[in-house]
Amino acid sequence: MEYNTVESLETLRKEAAAEFDAIASGQDAENFRVKYLGKKGILRDLVKSLGAMPPEERKVFGAAANALRGDIEGRFSEAPWQNKGAAAPDPGFDPTLPGYPFPSGSLHPLATIRRQIVDILVSMGFSIAYGPEIESDYYNFQALNMPPLHPARDMQDTFYMSENTVLRTHTSPVQIRVMEGQKPPIRAIMPGRVYRNEEISARSYCMFHQVEGLYVDENVSFADLKGTLLAFSRRFFDENTRIKIRPSFFPFTEPSVEVDVECFLCKGKGCSICKQSGWLEILGAGMVHPNVLKSGGIDPEKYSGFAFGMGIERIALLKYGIDDIRLFYENDVRFLRQF
Amino acid sequence: MKILYSWLKDFVDITAPAHEVANALTSAGIEVASVTEVSIPQGVRVARVVSRVQHPNADKLSLCKVDAGDGGEPLQIVCGAPNVAEGLTVALATVGTQMAPDFKIGKAKLRGVESFGMICSEKELGLSDNHAGIMSLPADYKVGAPLSDYIPYDAVIEIEITPNRGDCLSVLGVAREVSARFGVPLKNTAKRPQERTDDPISAAISVNVESESRCPRYLGRLVRGVTIAPSPEWMQRRLTLAGLRPINNVVDITNYILIQYGQPMHAFDYNSISDKKIHVKTAESAGAANFTTLDGVERKLAGDDLLICDGKRPVALAGVMGGAGSEITEATKDVFLECAFFEQGGIRKTSKRLGLSTDSSYRFERGVDPAQGLADAIDTAASLMAELAGGNVSGGMIDTHPKPFDDKVITLRPSRTGKIIGVEFPAENITLSLKSLGIKCLKQKNDLLTCTVPLFRHDIQEEADLIEEVGRQYGYDSIKPSTSANVDLVRQPSTAEINRDAARHALCYFGLNEVMTNSMVSESKRKSVTPDIEPVKILNPLNPDMAEMRTSMAISLLETIAYNLNRKNVNNRIFEIGKVFRPDPKSNLADERDILAVAAEGSCFPQSWGSPAVQNDFFVLKGILEAFAAHCGLEGISFAKMESAPLYGNERAAVTIKSASGAICGTMGRVSDQICKSFGIKSAVFYAELDLTAWLSAPKPLPEYAPLPKFPALERDFCFVMPEPLSAAEVCTETMSASPLIKAVRPFDVYRGEKLAAGTKSVAFSVEFRSPEKTLTDADVAEACGKIISVMEKKHGAALRK
């Protein structure tokens, strides 16, 4: 068809619009472009008709042809699929195929809980101290007010490497090492691995991890201990958490207490995690026994202090709702990848 | 320990129900593990079996006619107990009785025969765990009466006593705490026996304590003419509920005293005591090497074990267990009662060494009351024997320490109490609060109290212990938490924590799973991985698989991989920062090292629909270590050939990373097939370890900033055929030294094949040239390129491949 009148240009406009709307693939788009906008395309060819026209008609037709070309070029270049470069819709592309399996790593849940506990206590001004896992009987027991034959030694079944060397049964020996090496004020936490010669079951393992805290200065009181543990519990569990303190016994503290923290899951109403009591036994604590301060070379008349300790495994079991402590050390990767 | 609510009420008039008492005890530091109520359900009646015949359709069932005392016809009851018999007085749960919330007695048809109730066992009534047969009641119980008339409500409060509170291992001790908590006075229930003055004990037996420090006090009483028989119902019930098995009246009385006063006693058959003499002396002094205890076990003695001997031989292991031959039997007529205070440490030593812990040794180790408690216990026991076994108590009591013991007086400063607890306590309040615990305070001056502490409170030795009592009485929940402690202080970063986390996070980012493994390993595994390293051994391991401290993290990681492969978990890539241990002769302790260990097995990228699998191999692991070093800001990681290592096969290398704290050293490689096999692993495992001990505690240096290059780099590729032994590292070092313009050398292809002469390989590498001053041209690098070629050709016998 010859396009040499303004009317015929209207026909051309309709035809081009219909073809444009029917574009369904990159190939369709390319065909359209060649047919209409290419160097030998219909719209380019229109100018050839101009030569044969009378001047007035040429003026009107030329303007209309230019307008039509502008419109089609505009529509074509602004088509949504033009934004992805040359890629027009591709029916062969399936975004639901799986991504290439990228190995995803994980951090051990015990390490994560340890990190959370340590971070809070560090932000409360405690520095971190470490000690050996193979420890002398002196540091593990005697310096902590547990002379040989003290019945409290029964509370901790002990692995012995020799008569005077043990696998530490708690992180408390680090308290003595810290006090020996540092003058008050002392504000330290001691995370670490400890060992107990106990049968392995879902509830207990022959080793576990503790975080111990020690604060020694002039005028440190039980009220400070309570304030510190309340602040810790509120930051670790929930800002409204309550704590409950019961007398207990540890040879290295006097008074000694157990600290129950309001169950974070049921908020004290009673649930399966807290065995319907509303409270969780989380911490042991107390005022450092004068004999222990003396072991550390600190004058108990001038200074006083508090100490506290918690088990990382126990908190992790409660927090994640895990029912078997052995899972932590079996390291089944299907377990590890959940954290 | 099980404490009966009714028994407590013998000592304190409390109206609070058992669970309230339990809560009060817990908040006093006596942790209550459970409260079990003993309550005979309404509808359980005393009844008598009138007749018993075999059930027509069941061998093990009886068909009984039971008189329920309601005036009606005897009820037909089907009973499965083997001990049901005609004439037996029994507990009958009648139809309609609610035995438990979900168990109501109804009419039932058992094997075709109707049954109108249930004859109960002790267990069914919550009186004991005995379910072997039905409970037989005393014949004098009135048929038809509710059983609760005879067995009133009670509750068993099970408590856990911390080792310091030996004084609470008794009904009396717990009652003291209840008395203090509820402000109810403690009643003295001790009985004094009627004595036969015509039969003085001093004429009948003598006691000689050789070692007074080991036995500060020994009391003895003689009860003659007892009749051995079962103890009365009420005593048997209390003992049963407290968890003890009734035996006979004499033995039951000593056990009753044990529970009531926490005082262990021993009853000897008086007529078996040779020469009517008792000597308390050590095994060494007695010349005894062995002793057979009541349980029939012959025990080897140590010289300082304390013995009770008669004129000829040892008759008891003091405070631990009596001996065979002097115990109470059916034939016993005269009983010599021993009630002593043995020194704690000695008993503990013997008990520990023999592995023999008894109710008796447990209490002596924790300390009993050497004063009034001892006398109350033996007097009450003798009275009960007169009352319940028909004995006559001989005149007087043997007492090796008739003078009172010195008072235990401890000074207490109210100011110090306030300082430790964080609450101010006026002296008057302290005096009042300690009084309820039996501690008498006297005000000496303004800030000084002298406190007289009962001798049974072995846990109170110094001021700090009294401060605890004040705090405990005040109640820790009443103490206002100090807000000063609530303030966030300046964070003091810990280098070790930061570095440890940097390392852990790096490996996690690289797609590895962090593990945490046991540091105790088996000897065989340790020998397989590190045959030449002397381990630290555990004298008393839990089991042979945990007999040594690990000498290499490889043991733990290989075990973990084996564990996962056994569970069909494939493609394992794991890491841990853990400790390894070696004996340290310098310190007597151990040399503990912090080791980063990485192990990989299977594929790194598993096969997928559009990409092939990439297997974990030596160079994947090497890449992980290189990326680890880069992530941790450690420049200069190098890998060198390693002569031999028991852990690895042929693919292995020594790893060194430069750091400000000194070189981080390690090894890596493919674990030898033999070791994999010993762990039960069939696939190839690649393992690396780095000793991070020094690095962990070294502060991380600031990154060194280098300005970004202003001019583009020029790259040139070279390919040489070279002798096999020439390593990639040597090629790179040699090339780098050719010109300061060379910034990097990267091998990108290694070829071996038929086209090359034997013993040679073709290595292609690209060289990056860069100048800080200008854009380089071919001419600028021509000289350097020539130098590379000439060095490679002349020095290393390589030939440029065209």
Image: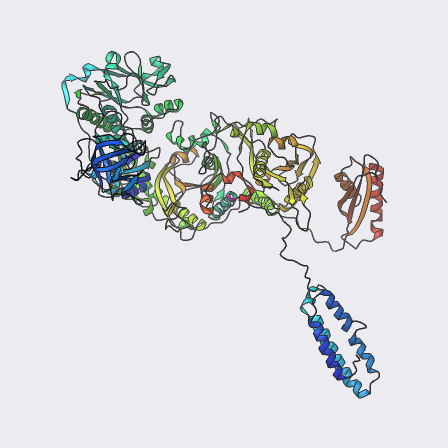
Q: Give the range drawn in magenta.
A: A105-109
Nearest the viewer among A263 and B493 is A263
| Residue A238 belongs to the span the image colors magenta | no
The residue furthest left is B198
Q: Which quadrant would residue B798 be assigned to in this image?
A: top right
Visible residue check, residue A174: yes
In this picture the colour scheme is rainbow
Q: Which quadrant would residue B755 be assigned to in this image?
A: top right
Is B642 located above or below residue A97 in the figure? above
Visible residue check, residue B740: no
In-image side of B21 versus B555 (left or right): left
Query: Where the C terminus of chain B falls, by quadrant?
Result: top right
Q: Where is residue A185 shown, x and y percent of the image?
A: 44, 42
Q: Residue at x 78, y 82 (%)?
A: A62
Q: Where is residue B584 shown, x and y percent of the image?
A: 55, 28
Main secondary structure found in the magenta portion: loop
| Residue A106 belongs to the span the image colors magenta | yes
Please give the count of numbered marks on the rendered protein: 0
Nearest the viewer among B754 and B448 is B754
Q: Where is residue A286 shown, x and y percent of the image?
A: 38, 40
Q: Which quadrant would residue B7 be assigned to in this image?
A: top left
Query: Where the N terminus of chain B falls, by quadrant?
Result: top left
Q: Where is residue B351 shown, x and y percent of the image?
A: 37, 24
Nearest the viewer among B317 and B282 is B317
In-image side of A267 versus B786 (left or right): left
In-image side of B163 versus A9 (left or right): left
